[in-house]
Image (cartoon, rainbow, N blue to C red):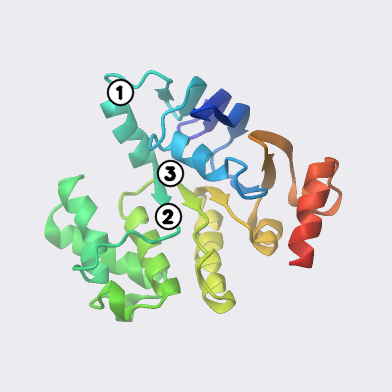
């Protein structure tokens, strides 16, 4: 197993009596870009949160590089911290600190978690903000940024921890089409550099253009998994056909 392959084996998750993930098995190789699509409530966001250790799960096993997550999380704190270092997570609602500027948001974790010097962290943060097209907005507070700009700051903040991959949870769903394009373009660029991306999305165009694989979740199961041209243009599962038809009509 390479140092940042993600392997899920029979992962099962319940919320009370509701079965959210039903024996999910999936392998994502280093450097792959995987789009997770499917109807709302299918378990996509829960799957990401289980990989990142934000949600517990009830059965199965998750491997993130050399780190193994089990249903029993007792004494697992260090493992979860290592997983979160390996895969950064970006959320739909940005989760920026409102009282910090863009560059301060990016600097925060490297200084306090990686014990990096403030000078070095600031230099890295500036490079990352320039990379996501926000070098001129480094001193702006979140309230002064558009939704697309906030999401690009969130990407720069995740990249400041030098992860091997990113888990992206519906990160464009609240943005208008032009701002979506800004954010998705940054993700495509990062993937070209070899970063592993696992992206929960309803953006079928992005899945077609930028994903190596598309996995379809419905009713807690992966019902289809393959190259975009196969899954999106020639879906086999009736549930996938119905979902894509609804997306086209929408």
Given residues 10 and 196, the one toward you in this image is 10
Residue located 24% across and 62% down the image: 97
Residue topped by disc 1: 76
Residue density around tag 1, few if under 14, some if 14–19, many if 20 or more, within 10 Å: few
Q: Position of residue 250 (x, y in %)?
A: 73, 67
Left or right: residue 133 compared with residue 213: left
First in residue order: circle 2 vs circle 3: 2
Q: Nearer the viewer, mark 2 or mark 3?
A: 2
Q: Can residue 230 be spotted in the picture? A: no
Left or right: residue 179 compared with residue 78: right
Quarter of the image holding residue 56? Answer: top left
The label on residue 91 is 2
Do the residues under discs 2 and 1 have CB atoms within 8 angstroms? no
First in residue order: circle 1 vs circle 3: 1
Cα–Cα span, label 1 and label 3: 21 Å
Q: Can residue 233 be spotted in the picture? A: yes
Secondary element at image label 1: loop
First in residue order: circle 2 vs circle 1: 1
Given residues 71 and 186, the one toward you in this image is 71
Residue topped by disc 3: 164
Quarter of the image holding residue 246? Answer: bottom right
Residue density around tag 3, few if under 14, some if 14–19, many if 20 or more, within 10 Å: many
Q: Position of residue 10 (x, y in %)?
A: 59, 22
């Amino acid at each position: 197993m390479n140092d940042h392959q993600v392997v899920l084996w029979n992962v099962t998750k319940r919320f009370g009596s509701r079965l959210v993930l039903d024996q999910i098995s999936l392998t994502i190789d280093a450097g792959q870009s995987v789009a997770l699509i499917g109807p709302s409530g299918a378990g996509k966001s829960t799957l990401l949160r289980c990989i990142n250790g934000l949600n517990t799960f009830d059965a199965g096993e998750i491997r993130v590089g050399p780190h193994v997550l089990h249903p029993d999380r007792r004494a697992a704190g260090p493992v979860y911290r290592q997983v979160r270092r390996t895969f950064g997570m970006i959320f739909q609602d940005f989760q920026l600190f409102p009282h910090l500027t863009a560059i301060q948001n990016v600097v925060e974790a490297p200084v306090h978690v990686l014990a990096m010097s403030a000078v070095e962290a600031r230099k890295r943060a500036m490079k990352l903000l320039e990379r996501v097209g926000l070098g001129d907005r480094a001193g702006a507070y979140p309230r002064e940024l558009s939704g697309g700009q906030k999401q690009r700051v969130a990407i720069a903040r995740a990249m400041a921890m030098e992860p091997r991959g990113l888990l992206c949870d519906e990160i464009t769903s609240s943005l208008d089409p032009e701002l979506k394009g800004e954010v998705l373009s940054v993700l495509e660029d990062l993937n070209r550099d070899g970063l592993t991306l696992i992206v929960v999305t309803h953006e079928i165009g992005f899945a077609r253009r930028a994903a190596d694989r598309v996995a379809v979740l419905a009713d807690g199961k992966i019902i289809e998994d393959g190259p975009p041209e196969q899954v999106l243009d020639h879906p086999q599962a009736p549930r996938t056909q119905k979902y894509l038809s609804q997306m086209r009509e929408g």
